[in-house]
Amino acid sequence: MNAKNIDKYTKEPGLVELKYFNLPEGEMFLLESGLKLPELKIAYETYGKLNARKSNAVLICHALSGDAHAAGYYRGEKKPGWWHEMIGPGKAFDTDKYFVVCSNIIGGCKGSSGPNSLDPRTGKPYGLSFPLVTIKDMVNAQKVLIDSFGIKRLLSVCGGSMGGMQALQWAVLYPDAVASCIPIATTYKHSAQQIAFSEVGRQAIMSDPAWNGGDYYEKGHPSAGLAVARMIGHITYMSNESMEKKFGRVLKKEKLGYEFTSEFEVEGYLRYRGDSFVKRFDANSYLYITKAMDYFDLQKDDKLSKAFKEVASRFMVISFSSDWLYPSFQSKEIVKALKMNGIDVTFCEISSDYGHDAFLLEFEEETKLIKHFLNTTHRRQKGHNDK
């Protein structure tokens, strides 16, 4: 069943189908490094209906551990997509009005070309022979997909965390193809501290003997290393306040056993997060994606304002008060650079105790902001198209 089949009574997207786009045979995809992929495959989902003018399309960009499954349900599964509360009739991304697209990034492991894909030249998984990719490469691949729909100009590009990096890159790289941009809980470049967290996670994976230089697909996954990487990452996604409220110093048993087991509730939670992540994610993709995030830097000649010189989009930049991974001051730097170029920009800092994870949890506040912003953009686009 296609994602356009919407249950209007429950206000939920119904069953959705993961689709695939492939470059025509013989065509190669050029990367920022100058290297070429011998083939390009993109996994994606769509929600809602593209109008006759193809002017109501919204692209949702996912974060590090996300994928194309942003909303709705797969047949036989009870868990919906990762932003299900935001996409559907009457929701922030109203599928009665908008045609919403979400694709898995290249370098990922959920259907798009990445290190776990089969190399057509060998018939085996690429592993580390897959070339390194950048945020710009991810966006260029999305542009190929969007072009395949015949869409000339997106109504909006939105994403949180790494998804926000992609949204920013879209506005900079394709200014005439983006009417509005909604970067959430993100940055225009990684700081040394942010790179450091990425590197510790990568080292956890590469130190696992099962990693085997990235060649593990037929020998056993480096589960221990990837689980630790996820545990490290998850600590940065939460705030001190949210961890204190959720766990405090609560013990799983009545008394300390003074042993190296997960005696505290927070220890058990992190181990659970690590173990569950291993079941759905590829270790090499974690390396590739975190490296792409570290490479990302929109600043030109030490001036961020230069990056936005040609931008033609409206912006709404959203941050969260307790996010210490991508703190609000980084969003404010983006806002300042946009204003220096006379760009229409709104900034909203949402008060939340959830930390960086707030963009996946603060649905009510995000919905109010995004719904109004998109409605305004849509009205302006209608006026623009009628001229």
Image (cartoon, rainbow, N blue to C red):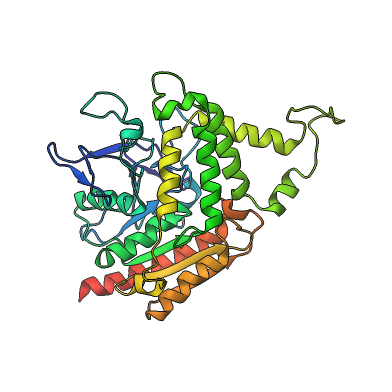
Q: Quadrant of residue 51?
A: bottom left
The number of callouts visible is 0
Nearest to the observer: residue 216 or residue 382: 216
| Residue 215 appearing in the image | yes
Looking at the picture, how far across and down is residue 207, in whole percent?
53, 31
Q: In the displayed structure, would residue 320 be above or below residue 141? A: below
Q: Is residue 270 above or below residue 53?
A: above
User: Between residues 5 and 315, which one lies in front from this camera angle?
Assistant: 315
Quadrant of the drawing holding the C terminus: bottom left
Is residue 277 visible to the viewer in this orientation of the structure? no
Q: Residue furthest left?
A: 26
Q: Nearer the viewer, residue 384 or 316?
A: 316
**Rendered residue at 44%/63% (across/down):** 188
User: In percent of the image, x 21 and y 37: which residue is there?
Assistant: 39
Nearer-the-camera pick, 214 or 146: 214
Name the image quarter holding residue 150: bottom left
Position of the N terminus, as image quadrant, is top left
Q: Residue furthest right?
A: 255
